[in-house]
Image: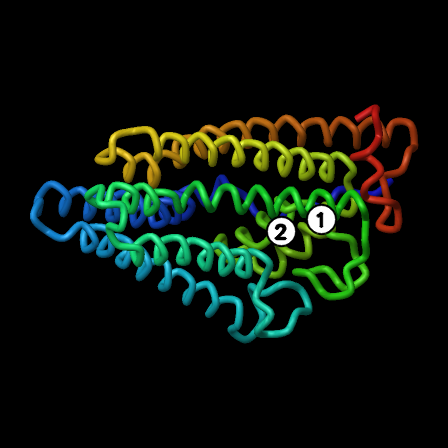
Amino acid sequence: MAVKSALPYSLHSRYRSIALAWTIITIPPIFINLGLFYGLWYGSPHMDRIAVLTIPTAVLGLFTALAILERIYKLTQTPPTFRPLASPRWALDVFQWGYFASLLLISALITSALARGDSDHDDHSLQTRLVSLPASLLMFFLATLTLLSLLLHHLALPLPFRFGSLEPGNALRPAVYYIVEDVVAVDGNGGAEYRRAWTQRYASSAVFRRMIWTLSVVWMLAFYVFAVLVAGLVFWLPVAAVYAVGWAGPFPLAGLMALWTIWYVKSVLREEEDVEDDGEAVGGRGLGRNDDERAPLLDSRV
């Protein structure tokens, strides 16, 4: 039987660093962004509304640029501690390229919204609503990328180029696989050791592969629902409330999904242990590297 590959990463010893990371993630879009917007909105009622919309997003863009620079530095430094396995120095990782694409979409939305001026003569109401949509756009975009990854994974088409840590000729894996690998390896400082163990764990465990598939499907559906819900509220609520709803609303929703994810992953890992114990008892074998990694996902018994 294939022996499960342990992941060299434990949340129990990293609660403080994880809390710090999420504090840094949430402070700019929620506290600084919303604080600036409503401070200018109510504190300077005679200020041009374009300036009220521009200043908070510009400050948020500055924090985003600093985060990108830090991440690129870690991915391109030598030795290649954090970059995908055996990848070129400037190839970065899958998460980073998705990050770039997301920023391009959000920048296009904000820029076009600010550039149109008050052409509707509604005291910039439509502009305010449009500038409140980046989180909805991001969720819709990530859900669509996840849907694409699931379709390509199901088709098992061999990729003609390297994708993350996988050599050319491998089929695409569900989006959650790449997100977890890249975020833990780079932002969580798991490094190349974690990337190797993550790849081996996915290859050796059918239960683990099913878990990644399920997580990708559930998060995809949740993001589609959240994107539509938040966008609907942005265009329905009074204009003074939509900026807070659009920018901060997705965070508690994602927090609930994160709690469900923790519960689900723990239950699956317990199931994985039971499957291994049963396999050892009957002398069975685990799925090897050369077996079809889609099979357990398509099996009606799973």
> To which residue does mark 2 refer?
178
Circle 2: element type: helix
- Seen at 60% across and 58% down, the residue is 94
Rendering coords of residue 113 (x, y %): 33, 52
Front residue of 81/76: it is 76
**From what the image shows, is residue 77 above or below residue 122?**
below
Q: CA distance from mark 2 to mark 1?
A: 8 Å
Is 116 on the left-hand or right-hand side of 135? Answer: left
**Res. 133 image quadrant:** top left
Tell me which label, 2 or 1, sits earlier in the chain.
1
In the image, which disc is placed on residue 173? Answer: 1
> Which quadrant, please, contains the N terminus?
top right
Is 290 on the left-hand or right-hand side of 51? Answer: right
**Res. 86 image quadrant:** bottom right
Amino acid type indicated by mark 1:
Arg
Rendering coords of residue 264 (x, y %): 60, 28
In the image, which disc is placed on residue 99? Answer: none
